Amino acid sequence: MKRRKFSAEFRREAIGLTRRPQASASQMAQGLGVNANLLGRWRHGQVEPGMGDGKADGQFQCATEQARA
C-alpha cells in the first residue's frame, strides 16, 4: 500500500479544525480519515509538507553538521 500524501493546505485546515473549542482531535482525525497521532504531529509542528515524519531528517542534519565542525 502506498503512503498517502497530504497537501500543506489540507494540513493547515485540519489543524485549524482541531483548534476549535468543542473539537476533539481524535474525532476530527477520524472524520478527516487520518490517524490521530499524525494529526497530533501536524499540530505540534513536527512535520513539514513534503517530508517524512521529521525525525530522521533532523537526525541526519545534526550528524552532518557535527561532522563538518
Image (cartoon, grey):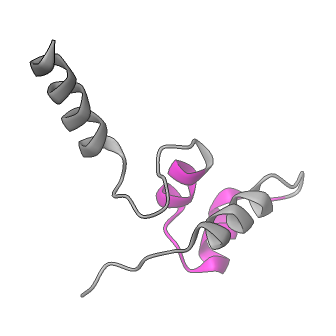
Horizontally, is 18 left or right of 56 in the view?
A: right
The x and y percentages for residue 34 are 52, 73
The x and y percentages for residue 49 are 49, 61
Residue 28 or residue 42, whichever sits in front: 42
Q: How many marks?
A: 0
Horizontally, is 56 left or right of 29 in the view?
A: left
Residue 34 lies, with reference to residue 38, above or below; the image says below
In which image quadrant can residue 57 be found?
top left
Residue 7 lies, with reference to residue 26, above or below; the image says below
In which image quadrant can residue 55 be found?
top left
Residue 62 lies, with reference to residue 25, above or below; the image says above
Residue 69 or residue 8, whichever sits in front: 69
Residue 64 or residue 46, whichever sits in front: 64
Question: Among all residues in the image, which is located at the extreme top?
Answer: 69
Residue 10 lies, with reference to residue 67, above or below; the image says below
The x and y percentages for residue 37 are 48, 56
Q: Which segment is the magenta one?
A: 23-42
